[in-house]
Image (cartoon, helix red, strand yellow):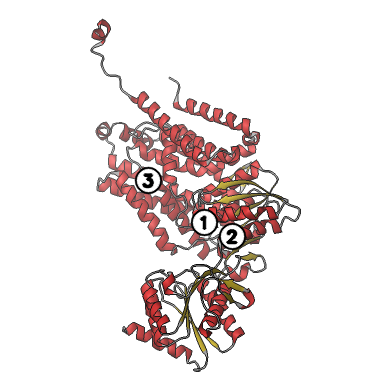
Amino acid sequence: MISRESILSAAIIALLALIATRFAGFVAPGNLAAVFTDTAPLIILALGQMVVILTRCIDLSVAANLALTGMVCAMLNTAMPGLPVALTLALAIGMGAGLGAINGLLVWKLAIPSIVVTLGTMTIFRGSIFLLSGGEWVNAFEMSASFTGFPRTVILGLPVLGWIAIVIIAGLALMLSRSTQGRAFFAVGGNPHAAVYAGIDVGRTQFLAFTLSGALAGLTGYLWVARYAVAYTDIAGGFELDVVAACVIGGISIAGGIGSVGGAVLGALFLGVIKNALPVVGISPFWQMAISGAAIIVAVAANSRAGRSKGRIILKQAEVRQ
Amino acid sequence: MTLKTLLATAAILAATGASAQDMRIAIVAKSLGNGFFEAAHRGAQEAAEELGGVEIIYTGPTTTTAEGQIEVINSLIAQRVDAIAISANDPDAVVPALKRAMQRGIAVISWDSGVAEEGRMMHLSPSSDDLVGQTIIKLAADHLPEGGQVALLSATSTSTNQNLWIEAMKQHLPEYPNIELVATVYGDDLADKSYRETQGLMQSYPDLDAIIAPTSVGIVAAAQAVADAGKIGQVNVTGLGLPSEMAGAVASGASKSFAIWNPVDLGYSATMIAYHLAKEDVTAEPGATIPIGRMGEVTLDDTNSAPMSEPFTYDSSNIDEFKSVF
């Protein structure tokens, strides 16, 4: 059977070819690098979300976590403009992980369904941003040059934001395929009962998945705020749905246990190409929603076909005779 | 009268200590400690000095509540001020208190944020849809003497005020024959989508000269996208924004100028109108014209409300003064 990754790659290439017929400049290497960089936040969040979905959970609070961590980073930078970027990065990752761990603990210790937990923390995080900032914006002129400059520094033709995504893709691919913990994420989602017999703590694994997803969301929070040079309550509003969509398009099974790093990255890139192409080819923004929606349904349909177990056929003869 | 009101009255009386002949005009803010209203207070003081014999009582609740404003109004009535100019926290809740004030012969107007018709003599709005439309195209055209291509970056395609402004702008477009409007795109008031739409505009129209964004989220994102694309000086971002949010873009040169109402002018004009109404040298009725000093005059419409002027333009010459105000 042809793998999901190759189908998606073909779809993205076909999409790029189609766009090139209407706007040739889109497929220039420089522009493709820009599209990849623009999609980097979605890729990073989709990878975190993938790990959570693998363990049969879902994290709806990623965008709110991103916004809250981003606001804290921006406010801290305003208060202490001299703070080194490395420290800001460490703080963003640490704070994001902390917020993710809250989700994880609630799912693990109180056994509340993850969709309910993260729906709650999503609104709590958004509310906290408003309380923290008083509804005020943190604006470009209040941020230091190194704070906003870091993600856009170009190394070998690609901004740092793009490089960070590449490092995370490589790190996660290695972790999921080569480490015990990485395999445990698959085991817990694939068959929780068997995982328990294999000595894996299901709750703890889910907790770690949420913490990882939170850490990546926190990191993206700083990158997002620095990239757009503005922080306010509603940044990345509704972005969690794009993240889940990227995972589903990338073939990560909502039922858990099935998925790959390549799939999540390609799913995110598919959405990223559509988002970046629609403004230049001059199609109504409503087409973007329709195309993304259609892609999700096609992907889920393909998943359920592939994942359907073949039942025993006991009436074959009767069928033929009739 | 509650204890709080008494205390407020006492505080205001103690603070003013005015001579009896002075006309006393109260400027009621939505809340104290807000830069926008502090600036309006400055404008009111300017008007008072210009008029002479006028004393400004600048007051308001500490939080933006209608209850707080009602207490303030009651204490102003008790002091028998000559006029009240209010920016209301609720158009209806303050009506009974303001009606009482008018019954006692106090001239009452609303400004910035209006009061329902029966609760005030007239309302001064900062601007009108037509004036906004006229201003945003002029902002772009002023920096394009030889003409050029402009594009619009709006919020959502269903946003009422955005669409009214864009419609008004299109009506003023024929006044600038060399300016061509090439596209209208929607950034949905999301920073990332507005940024992406701006990138798309610059790719689709390599000769684009200006982007007009009559939305505070859009204009900031567009300026950032232009700066990141290295197109500062080539593409000018303009529209409606707040000085605090746009200071960075003006400093980088991505935006040469933008517009929004000027709180100083608003406080000045409100004081002028309150003065004339309290002196009874004009009557607030549909079609009436009221002089507002250096700002010219306003003409009341059927609902006794009037726009002050076109939005005020901010550029590198005045941004530093206003970026800490609002």
**Left or right: B104 as drawn, with respect to A20:** left
Which residue is most to the right?
Answer: B146
Element type at mark 1:
helix
Element type at mark 3:
loop
Question: Three-letter amino acid code at disc 1?
Answer: Asn
**Is residue A301 positioned above or below A227 on the image?**
above
Question: Three-letter amino acid code at disc 2?
Answer: Asp
Residue shown at 53%/37% (left/top)?
A: A274
**Is residue A101 positioned above or below B242 on the image?**
above
Element type at mark 2:
helix
Residue A155 position, x and y percent, is: 62, 44
In the depicted view, which residue is nearer to us: A27 or B147?
Answer: B147
For marks 1 and 3, give the CA distance: 32 Å
Residue A304 position, x and y percent, is: 35, 27
Checking the image for residue A60, the label placed there is: 3
Mark closer to the chain start, 2 or 1:
2
Q: Nearer the viewer, mark 3 or mark 2?
A: 2
Dot 1 and dot 3 within a common chain? no
Question: Three-letter amino acid code at disc 3?
Answer: Leu
User: Which residue carries the number 1 mark?
Assistant: B161
Residue A292 position, x and y percent, is: 46, 36
**Is residue B98 positioned above or below A8 on the image?**
below
Q: Nearer the viewer, mark 1 or mark 3?
A: 1
**Left or right: B92 as drawn, with respect to B163:** left
Q: Nearer the viewer, mark 2 or mark 1?
A: 2
Residue shown at 49%/33% (left/top)?
A: A266
User: Which residue carries the number 2 mark?
Assistant: B130
